[in-house]
Image: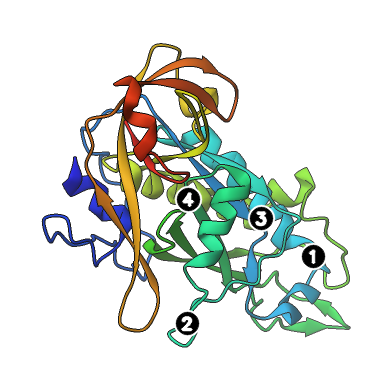
Amino acid sequence: MFTQLTQFITPCLLVLSLFCHASSAQPELAQTSAVPACHSSIKASILVPQAQIHDRSQLRYGQIGHFEQHLSQRLTQKLNLNLQHGFALTYSKERLDFSPSLSSTHSTRIPNWLNTITNSQYLLIPSINNIATDNPRYIFGLWETSPNRQFVITLSLYHGISGERIWQKRYESEAEWEFSLTAQVDSASQTFWQSDYGQNIDTVLSQVSHDLDHTLACRPVIGQVIARYGNKILINLGRRNGVKVGDNFRLVLQNQMQDRINIERITAVDSDVQITIDQVSENIAKSHLSPQDAMSNIQINDLILK
């Protein structure tokens, strides 16, 4: 269990000196491989904010000014249709200013903060690299032939507790842009999504959902203690995560320490505390502890594992 746990928490985990596994970026759309034979009844919640775009001037073709918002909504639909090991929460109207860099000490804090306020376990950021249209050939100011339009997107998955990026992949495709030069295209409409370009995007997003499910398949869902009172605690996993009354979980104590550049690192300490769920709502669950004197060691944000 701790081998799996350290995949999420930090590359500096001191418990057993294990290391974090991160999926490397892939330059091309790949064939879906079989999902590993790992089974868990608990599903992870994945926060999907508004997609980022590198060059907003490319939105002028078709005047698709809300494309980033509509793309995140479509991605969420595809994830919830195809994911077996998670579900998506869309915040498509929220434009997230998040560009991790070596010079920023806040790169890991934003996923953690969003995890706290939305009860999500992961942050998935879509970044639109290129939606440029090929140069058309004109006749009397009209397009002679419908040009192709690029769709290049990078998906990055961050863990909500450690803030680390654990998966990233780039997808490249193109399809015919069949709308006229002066058309105003509603990127939320069925006309758009039933076009060749919209169907091409759907194909890419379906591939994204399968690749993401493969990534999540053997990763344990890690919840956290969000409140405590008496011999009861609340955890940030609920009915949508697959939690049921009577389920048993393990408690892992969380410690924080500063590293050599004053960044807080999370370490984990095993415990014998068992958690039994006795009440469940959509996003949280209430539980009692065993043994009964275990509450003295429990802190807010301690970790919960199935």
| 168 is higher (above) or lower (below) than 116 | below
Q: Nearer the viewer, mark 3 or mark 1?
A: 3
Secondary structure beneath label 4: strand
State the residue in front, 208 or 229: 229
- Would residue 30 be found to the left or right of residue 123 on screen? left
Q: Which residue is mark 3?
A: 71
Mark 2 and mark 4: Cα distance apart in space? 19 Å
Q: Would residue 215 be visible to someone looking at this image?
A: yes
| Label 3 element class | helix
Tell me the kind of residue under disc 1. Answer: Ile
Query: Which numbered disc flags the more N-terminal residue, 2 or 3?
Result: 3
Which residue is at a point 52% across and 74% down the rendered structure image? 106
Disc 2 from disc 3: Cα separation: 25 Å
Q: Position of residue 236 (x, y in %)?
A: 51, 35
Mark 2 sits on what residue? 101
Q: Earlier in the sequence, mark 2 or mark 1?
A: 1
Verify CB contact (< 8 Å) between mark 2 and mark 1. Answer: no
Which residue was labeled with disc 1? 64
